[in-house]
Structures are given as C-alpha cells and as structure tokens.
Image (spheres, grey):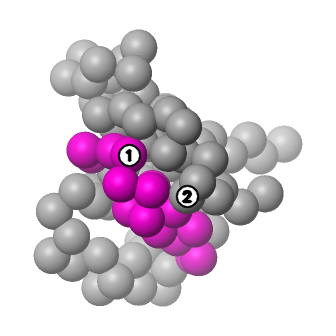
Amino acid sequence: MPIVPDTLKKYPNPVFFETGTGGNCSGIRAALASGAFGEIHSVELNEGKGYVKELKRFKGERKVTLHLGDSAEVLSRMLPTMETSKAVAKLKVVM
C-alpha cells in the first residue's frame, strides 16, 4: 500500500525509516513531499539496479540517507543515535 504525503503530515517526526524501497522509492518520495521529517532513511538489502538508481535519484538530497545491508542490522546500529519514540517506520515483512 503506498504511503500518502498528506497522511505523513499528521505525524511529523525527526526520523522516517523505510526498509526496502522495492525500486519505486514511494516511501522516500512521500516522506520528502510531506515535509514532516528531518531525516529520511531507507535500507536496501542488495546492491542491484534499484539501489544504484536510488543513489542517483537522491544524490544531493540532504535529508535522505540510503543504507545497504540487512534492515535489522542497520536499524540496530541507528537506534542508539535516534529519538526512537519519535521515529516513524515503514517496514516490509516478507514471509
């Protein structure tokens, strides 16, 4: 289900965290469009075409940080540096 910028505006927070963009970057784009976040983080597991495309698309976008690796590991490294009570996360669960 896509994230709508107007929905995100209702929950302004310092941090937005997304796992797996799926190549369409809808979470990142919605978080940017909402203007509700100071930091936007997205994690990709594989360094494939989608990740390279995202790097090019968001190059120079100061609020966006792209991470490569396992979401659980990246998030566990980031949590100590974040105001976790105020983070908004879009997590994908794969079964």
Image quadrant containing the N terminus: bottom right
Element type at mark 2:
helix
Q: Is residue 46 above or below residue 59?
A: above
The numbered disc on residue 85 is: none
Residue at (48, 85) in percent of width and height? 49
Element type at mark 1:
loop
Side (left or right) of 89 relative to 53? right
The numbered disc on residue 36 is: 1
Q: Position of residue 4 (x, y in %)?
A: 64, 58
- Of all residues, the one furthest to the right in this rendering is 95
Q: Image quadrant of residue 14? A: top left
Residue at (38, 62) in percent of width and height? 32
Residue at (54, 46) in percent of width and height? 8
Q: Position of residue 81 (x, y in %)?
A: 20, 23
Lower sequence index among marks 1 and 2: 2
On the image, numbered disc 2 is attached to which residue? Answer: 5
What amino acid is labelled 2 in the image? Pro
What amino acid is labelled 1 in the image? Ala
Determine if residue 40 is in view: yes
Q: Nearer the viewer, residue 35 or 31?
A: 35
All told, the count of numbered labels is 2
Q: Which residues are magenta?
A: 23-39
Q: Is residue 13 above or below residue 52?
A: above
Side (left or right) of 13 relative to 19? left
Q: Position of residue 91 (x, y in %)?
A: 62, 41
